Amino acid sequence: MSADQAGGHRQLLQDYGELARCFGLLSEPVRLRIALLLARQERSVNSLRDELKLPQPTVSHHLGVMRAGGVVDARRAGKQRFYRLCGPGSSNGALTLHADGCWIRLMLGAAPSPKS
């Protein structure tokens, strides 16, 4: 294996590792629900708390894990923080992940009806 091939292989493993790490973060049901809500629009902790019907510290904990993992970021507006998904295309009802030149786009909404 040439040095270029080895470098490319290492990059692929890093990309796959990053994708697996992201899926690992989203494998927790509360974090997945948060991601799906944020895919529609940015939200405050209070808005997420009300929608999820969970205590504010629980929501804040999961947002902290997601922020540390690079899945969400936040902007401050007065005393509130508004959270949104990170990454290109991670909005408008979709969550987009990228690795190895492939984009994985999770679309939200009703499933299409099966064709008869």
Image (cartoon, grey):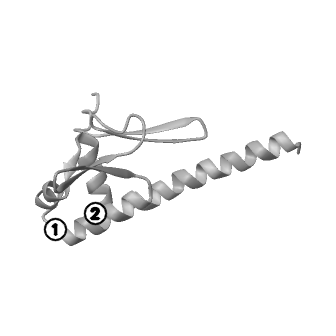
Q: Is residue 79 visible?
A: yes
User: Which quadrant of the figure has residue 94?
Assistant: top left
In the rendered view, does 50 fall on the left or right side of 2?
Answer: left
| Secondary element at tag 1 | loop
Q: Is residue 19 above or below residue 2?
A: below
Q: Residues within 10 Å of mark 1 (few under 14, many from 20)?
A: few
Task: Pinpoint residue 57: horizontal percent, then vertical percent.
Answer: 21, 71
In the rendered view, does 81 fall on the left or right side of 62?
Answer: left
Q: Which mark is residue 54?
A: 1
Give the residue type at disc 1. Answer: Leu
Q: Residue at x 81, y 41 (%)?
A: 5
Q: Identify which residue, 43 or 36, lies in the foreground.
A: 43
Q: Are marks 2 and 1 in contact (CB under 8 Å)?
A: yes
Q: Which mark is residue 30?
A: 2
| Secondary element at tag 2 | helix
Count how many numbered circles sit on residues in the image.
2
Give the residue type at disc 2. Answer: Val
